[in-house]
Image (cartoon, helix red, strand yellow):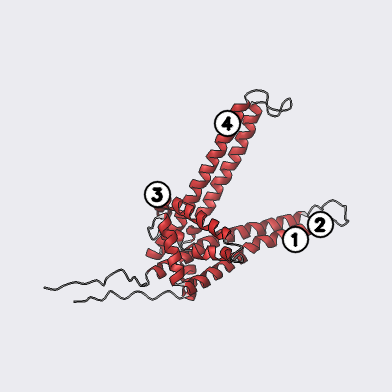
Amino acid sequence: MMVAPPPAPEPIRFDTLLAQSWTLFRDNWIVALPPVVGFGLILVAVIAYVAAAVVTALAHGAFAHGGIEHGANGFVAALVLGYLGLIVLIIVVSLWVNAAMFGMADAVWARGTTTFADGFAAFRTRSGALFVAGIGLVGVALAALFLALPTLFLSFLAFPLVTMYVLPSVVGGGRGGFAAVGESFRLVRDFFGVSAISCLVLAGIQYGVSMLSSFAIVPLEFSMIPTTPDGPPHMPPIWLLGTSGMFFLLGMLAAFAYGGYHTIAVVGLYRSLRAQPRPDPGRPPVRTFSG
């Protein structure tokens, strides 16, 4: 006899998605922490690299007698090796940040809570697929660049839309890198309306949050404008420097926080849309037989 498949859950409403994402983020704000940790590690690595470069240069006499006199090859080799090591570190940290955020966000939707253990587990199991997905995203970005003029730059607008489900597909969906790119394209094609609206609204919120830091810089720029055409720039007052710095820091914290909320929202939308039935002409209906 024919057995009907279980009914699929209703697709999540966009207003419900935003509200549930906020509730989950409020209780699991640590989802926003991986970029903070990653940025701190990279900053420390850059400072260490610059300090090591200066020390190496001093050891080889780079600042004495007009330049390096001895050991130039060793000095250059040390700089190149340090730079390559820095690039590798940035790649690894970037993979960890994305794996941790999306792994933790997926755990939030699955059981309502998460820890950093979910992030490390996602990095351990999905970092390779994330790296391959990054290569696929670069390929899609190059295609968007080549199609910019023929499409009147609409390809630039389409790029964040058609790739919005790639990272959730890799981490939460368990897809391979290139398979995740394909699934993202298919989900956007099958659910174009909700995907486009979600992408636009989330991007608009992100733009508004990013403007907070810009508002902190604008007063400084105006205060430095010379009063005469050939005059030197003015030194901003101390109170303005402190106030702008405080608002800039708050804007950066808001941007990091929104990154966690955005990740939870995109993962929730991906999980909802992936659960919806889609036509598959090549797949026969499921049958069972009774004795």
Q: Secondary structure at mark 3?
A: helix
Q: Which residue is mark 4?
A: 77
Vertically, is 260 above or below 76? Answer: below
Q: From the image, which quarter does the C terminus lie in?
A: bottom left
Q: Secondary structure at mark 4?
A: helix
Image point (57%, 61%), residue name: 147
Q: Toward the viewer: 244 or 289?
A: 289
**Which is in the foreground here, disc 4 or disc 3?**
4
Q: Which mark is residue 244?
A: none
Q: Secondary structure at mark 1?
A: helix
> Hey, which residue is sitting farthest top in the picture?
70
Q: Which mark is residue 124?
A: 3
- In this view of the protein, can residue 26 be seen by the observer? no
Q: Amino acid at mark 2?
A: Ile
Q: Which residue is mark 1?
A: 219
Image x and y of residue 116, in percent = 43, 53
Q: Amino acid at mark 4?
A: Ala
**Which is in the foreground here, disc 3 or disc 1?**
3
Name the N-terminal-most of marks 3 and 1. 3
Image x and y of residue 231, in percent = 87, 52
Q: Which residue is mark 2?
A: 225
Q: Amino acid at mark 3?
A: Arg
Q: As drawn, is 36 to the left or to the right of 62?
A: left
Q: CA distance from mark 3 to mark 1?
A: 45 Å
CB-based contact (under 8 Å), mark 4 and mark 3: no
**Which is in the foreground here, disc 2 or disc 4?**
4
Q: Secondary structure at mark 2?
A: loop
Q: CA distance from mark 2 to mark 3?
A: 51 Å
